[in-house]
C-alpha cells in the first residue's frame, strides 16, 4: 500500500489513553501522516471484559474510523488485539490492520537469565494470541505473568507516579525480581507511561520492552514509507473519546507532547456517533 499520494489519515484505537504510547512512536517515525485517535473511555478498562464484548466494541470503532476516512487501522491495544484482530480481518477484508501482541519473541531471544516478566491484562493473557506467542517463542524461557490490577485505571486518572501506582507495580515486580527476571515485557499499551517508575523499581540491569516502535515500523512498512521525514510534523491529529472531552483534554498534555481537536462521541446501541 503506498500512502505517498494517499492523504487519508491513519486510524488508531484503544480502550482509553494507552494507545497514545503507540501514537507517540508513529509520530516519531511518520510525522507527516495525519491520525485519527479513538479512546473508548466510557468502556475502559477492556482488560476485565469478555472477549466477545471487546470484539463488538472493536468492530464498531473500526467502522466509525473508516467512516471518518481512515486508510488503515492500528489496534493500539493488546486486549482488543487479543479479542478481535482475527475477527476484524475477517469482517473487513479490504482493510489493513496492525495489531499488538506481547513482545515475548524479542524478550526470549535476548534474555540471559532465562526468566522474563510479562505485564498485561487478564483478557490478553486469556486470548489465543498470547498462547500462540508463548508456544512459538518461549519454550526455553520461564515466563512470569502479572495483570497489575488497577494500573490501567490509575493511568487513566493521570496518576503516573503516586503511591498507589507504585504499590501495584511493586507487588507485580518484586516477586519477579526475586525469581531472577532480566527483562520485562509491557503487554499493555497503557504501561509505557509508567516506565520511569518501573525503572526505579527494577533498576538499570533489567530491560523493559515497549513494543510501540516496532508497531510504528510495521505501519511504515504497510504504507510503504521508509523515510523519516524532517520536522515540522505536517500530519494533523484528531482525537475522539467516548468519555468526557474535557477530561481527555486535561490528561493529554501529561501523556503526549502534542495536541489536536478533541471530539466527544456517544455509543448508540452498537453504533458510534459524534455528539
Ligand atoms: N491499553 C490496553 C491494552 O493494551 C487495554 C487496557 C484496558 O483497557 O484494560 O491492553
Image (cartoon, rainbow, N blue to C red):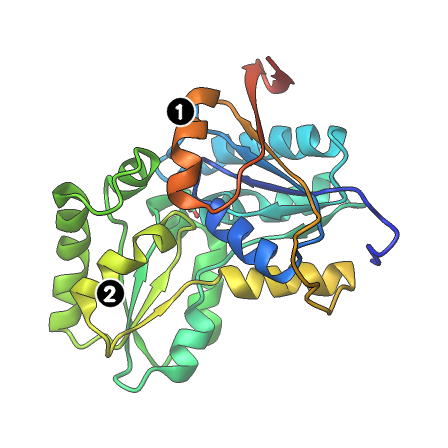
In this view, 42 is above or below 140: above
According to the picture, the residue beneath numbered tag 1 turns out to be 247
What is the C-alpha distance between the residues marked 1 and 2? 28 Å
The N terminus, quarter of image:
bottom right
Q: Which residue is at 53% across, 38% downward?
A: 259
Q: Is residue 92 left or right of residue 209?
A: right
The image shows a total of numbered marks equal to 2
* Earlier residue among tags 1 and 2: 2
Q: Which residue is at 41% across, 49% downward?
A: 124
Q: Which residue is at 62% across, 65% downward?
A: 217
In this view, 110 is above or below 200: below
In this view, 91 is above or below 228: above
Query: Label 2's element?
Result: helix
Name the spot of residue 258 as percent of width and height, x first. Answer: 52, 43
In this view, 158 is above or below 111: above
Query: Label 1's element?
Result: helix
Name the spot of residue 205 as percent of width and height, x first. Answer: 24, 79
Name the spot of residue 3 as percent of width and height, x first. Answer: 82, 54
Query: Which label sits on residue 207?
Result: none
Q: Quadrant of residue 214?
A: bottom right
According to the picture, the residue beneath numbered tag 2 turns out to be 199
Amino acid at each position: 500500500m503506498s500512502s505517498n499520494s494517499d492523504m487519508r489519515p491513519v486510524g488508531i484505537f484503544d480502550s482509553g489513553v494507552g494507545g497514545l504510547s503507540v501514537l507517540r512512536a508513529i509520530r516519531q517515525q511518520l510525522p507527516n501522516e495525519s491520525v485519527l485517535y479513538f479512546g473508548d473511555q466510557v468502556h475502559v478498562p477492556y482488560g476485565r471484559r469478555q472477549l466477545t464484548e471487546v470484539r463488538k466494541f472493536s468492530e464498531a470503532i473500526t467502522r466509525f474510523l473508516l467512516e471518518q476516512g481512515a486508510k488503515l487501522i492500528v489496534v493500539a491495544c493488546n486486549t482488543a488485539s487479543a479479542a478481535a484482530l482475527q475477527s476484524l480481518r475477517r469482517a473487513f477484508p479490504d482493510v489493513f490492520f496492525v495489531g499488538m501482541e506481547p513482545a515475548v519473541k524479542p524478550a526470549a531471544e535476548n534474555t540471559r537469565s532465562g526468566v522474563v516478566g510479562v505485564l498485561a491484562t487478564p483478557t490478553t493473557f486469556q486470548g489465543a494470541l498470547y498462547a500462540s506467542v508463548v508456544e512459538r517463542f518461549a519454550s526455553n524461557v520461564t515466563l512470569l505473568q502479572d495483570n497489575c490490577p488497577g494500573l490501567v485505571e490509575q493511568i487513566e486518572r493521570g496518576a503516573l507516579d503516586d503511591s498507589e501506582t507504585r504499590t501495584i507495580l511493586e507487588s507485580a515486580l518484586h516477586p519477579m525480581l526475586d525469581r531472577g527476571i532480566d527483562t520485562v515485557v509491557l503487554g499493555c499499551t497503557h504501561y509505557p507511561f509508567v516506565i520511569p517508575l518501573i525503572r526505579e523499581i527494577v533498576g538499570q540491569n533489567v530491560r523493559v520492552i515497549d513494543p510501540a516502535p516496532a508497531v510504528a515500523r510495521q505501519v511504515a512498512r504497510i504504507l510503504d514509507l521508509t523515510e523519516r521525514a524532517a520536522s515540522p510534523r505536517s500530519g494533523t491529529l484528531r482525537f475522539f473519546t467516548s468519555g468526557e472531552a474535557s477530561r481527555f483534554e486535561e490528561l493529554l498534555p501529561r501523556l503526549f507532547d502534542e495536541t489536536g481537536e478533541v471530539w466527544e462521541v456517544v455509543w448508540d446501541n452498537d453504533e458510534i456517533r459524534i455528539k
